[in-house]
Amino acid sequence: MPPSGLTALILGAGAGGGVPQWNCACRVCQLVRSGDARVCASTQVGVAFSADETHWLLVGASPDLRQQILKTPQLHPREGPRDSPIFATALISADVDGIAGLLVLREQQRLSVFAPGPVLEVLRRNAVFDVLNPAMVDRIHVAPLHAVDCGYGLTLTLLPMPGKVPLYLEDRAAEQPQAAPTYAALVQANGHRVIVAPACAEISDTVRSHLRLADVVFFDGTLFTDDEMITAGVGTKTGRRMGHVPVSGVGGSLEGLADLPARKIFLHINNTNPLLLNGSPERRQAEEAGFEVAFDGMEVRL
Ligand code: MLT
Ligand code: MN
Ligand code: ZN
């Protein structure tokens, strides 16, 4: 008998750029490079789901997907000459760290790509994604807030999140106000419910009510403080400006999700974020508030 539950494997817990980021000399990136035991390297965000431990749905397709699959035995081919336990990918944003990994999934493999209209539109406009043979890769439109049966016992619902268009579309946002908003994925199987929400600009009442749908919530842990990238000297934008509510401060996620009954796990953690440093005061503050910090290879079984 196959196990009946819902398994989430964290393929990548990092935000865009990963940890360490190729060109970053911030404190955490340098600690990882020096082999400091308090921090671990993270690849860019991705979660794999299964209801039977045999067939896997990916949520997100980051540029690190090839390396993530190599590191995850559950995702290796089983019988030749061509095979993959990955039967589908759900795309929840058109950010580079949300879609670039699709290019890794070429090579004539049958696959379904579930995505909202604006993300499908980005794929359609960028001819490089046609490298995924249309005869083998179905692009399936998912309307927000409608549960879709993905197969193998897994149901997907896209929950709209406050956010922004991808960086590379910002100049064109006026022409395409809905160019590619951002979503959370609610994945359900066997009565268990998990949400993956790597980008959320504000914890509104609607967001809170969406997050109440799940037993486990992987939530936007990009920055600990809103001005963290400015303070670290690696950027000019606040977290909110980038579509990511900070963990701390007024309106931050520690405050805004304090009474959420779900198991709460930060994901999409930027390399500047002191949450990545085991034992840091910021990490302790989050843990004492009942939040966990995701890491590559983390498994959650329901
Ligand atoms: C984000 O999460 O804000 C984006 O992934 C940033 C980026 O495009 O690198
Ligand atoms: Mn990102
Ligand atoms: Zn860094």
Image: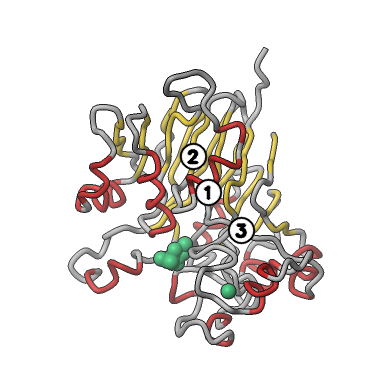
The residue beneath circle 3 is: 42
Looking at this view, is 3 or 105 the one in front?
105
Residue 61 lies left or right of residue 287; in this view the side is left
The residue beneath circle 1 is: 46
Query: Which label was assigned to residue 58?
Result: 2
Tag 1's secondary structure? strand
Q: How many labels does the image show?
A: 3
Is the residue marked by circle 1 packed among few (<14), some (14-19), or many (20+) residues within 10 Å? Answer: many
Tell me which amino acid carries mark 3.
Ser
Structural distance between the alpha carbons of marks 3 and 1: 11 Å
Circles 2 and 1, Cβ within 8 Å, touching? The answer is: yes
Residue 35 lies left or right of residue 69; in this view the side is right
Tell me which amino acid carries mark 1.
Gly
Q: Residue at x 48, y 47 (%)?
A: 65
Tell me which amino acid carries mark 2.
Leu
Structural distance between the alpha carbons of marks 3 and 2: 17 Å
The response on whether ligand 2 sits within 8 Å of label 1 is no
Q: Residue at x 71, y 71 (%)?
A: 34
Tag 3's secondary structure? loop
Q: Looking at the image, is mark 3 or mark 1 nearer the viewer?
A: 3
The response on whether ligand 2 sits within 8 Å of label 2 is no
Question: Residue 238 at x, y = what percent?
Answer: 49, 80
Q: Residue at x 42, y 41 (%)?
A: 90
Is the residue marked by circle 3 packed among few (<14), some (14-19), or many (20+) residues within 10 Å? Answer: many
Q: Which residue is drawn at 38% across and 52% down?
A: 100
Tag 2's secondary structure? strand
Q: Mark 2 or 1 closer to N-term?
A: 1
